[in-house]
Amino acid sequence: MFVQLICRDRSPKEIEELYQIIGAICEREGIQAEERGDAVEILVCPQGKILVTEEDRDVTLTANTRHAGAGFHAFCVDIFKDIEEEQPGKYELIDDLEYANDEDFHRLHHVYENELDYIRNLILTDPDFRRKNYLYDETYFLPKAEEDEILTSRGPLSKKEFQSMELHDLMDYFYVWNDWDRDARFYRNAALTLLAKEGVGEYTVMNDATIKTANEICDYLEIAHEKDPALPLPVDTYFLLINLLGREDRLKDCPKMAGPAVQYRSRDVYHLFADCQVVAPGAAERSFDPVTNSVNLMAPYKEEGEWSWLIQASKDDHILTDKAQVMDQEPHMEEGGMLWMDDWEEDGFAVVEAVIRKDEDHLYIHAIANSDKYVPYLKDCIRQSGFVPQR
């Protein structure tokens, strides 16, 4: 589920013209393009983006369409063909689903149904696969599931309901774009996916990124309601967001969707880095320190300057204040591996440090809090942390 357009042997002037064409297409389609380092990302929907890169005299547009759905795959092929028509030159269009050859959307839709059937079977039969990222195109966290539930962007399903649901009905639980057009269902799915993947609930106005995401969610829901006023939407969640953001209510008389919208980042999740997973709130502010090769997770907050605790995790033991002291503690066997943990107070701060060992791998954790009342919670997070299960 992959589409790529290689624009070969372009002069600098032709490359500049190519970006102008891409910009015009983005404006026509109402989608956003952002520069990210040496690449440009075209953000079509929460599960679908097109990456534009340059190498020598070639410009390449690439899209992984596995998570967004059949509509996104067809959209990529269509705009890639538009580019071919707009600028003469040598092109190579690669489409592993061969939609570019027959443009048969009905057949393409069945390909995604078959893929979902395959994924469903893996989820039901392989516990390790169920603990991996089968939901999202890109994410630095994994939501935590209960034993008898299957997580989806529209919320958890019981195993029985998940197993018996018709594939056509299940599509909206896993993909954003399931029809040809970007209709009301597309915008509702986009909002629900973004809520599940990036929604932080009460911490919505924590920083610029969370505010931007919340506004995008509201935009999606308002467009969905404009396109189909009878379509049920997560009205209660929308009201929470507009009250926090100070937006006008544009979902008047909108029917409520059955069940609440899910926001995994408002709960504890597994934060991923390397082959490790660290349990902390999904809304925790995340940063990476290249000097200590560590991921840093700071407690979420509602007001700027509010600070309570920080978890630092690394595969480098230099982050520990006193490794020997931690290793002198009585080890315990946890799900993540063998655990050594110690805590103490230093300069008015509570400190918790730990070593998790699984086979020959080690994960080191240093946590600090402004009060010892957070120590039990930090210890509980550490006990649930460890290494990503390998198939």
Image: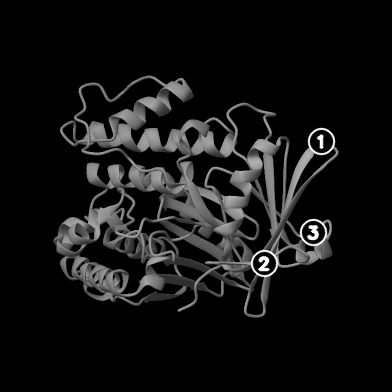
Q: Which amino acid type corresponds to the residue marked 3 in the rendered image?
A: Leu
Sequence order check, earlier mark of 3 and 1: 3
Q: Which amino acid type corresponds to the residue marked 2 in the rendered image?
A: Pro
What residue is shown at x 39% (from left), y 56% (from top)?
145
Q: Which amino acid type corresponds to the residue marked 1 in the rendered image?
A: Gly
Task: Describe the colour scheme in one phrase.
Answer: one colour
Q: Secondary structure at mark 2?
A: loop
Residue 5 lies, in percent from the top left, at: 44, 70
The residue labelled by disc 2 is 331
- On the picture, is 263 further left or further right than 328? left
Q: Nearer the viewer, residue 94 or 182?
A: 182
Q: Are marks 2 and 3 in contact (CB under 8 Å)?
A: no
Residue 137, quarter of picture: bottom left
The residue labelled by disc 1 is 348
Q: Secondary structure at mark 1?
A: loop
Q: Are marks 3 and 1 in contact (CB under 8 Å)?
A: no
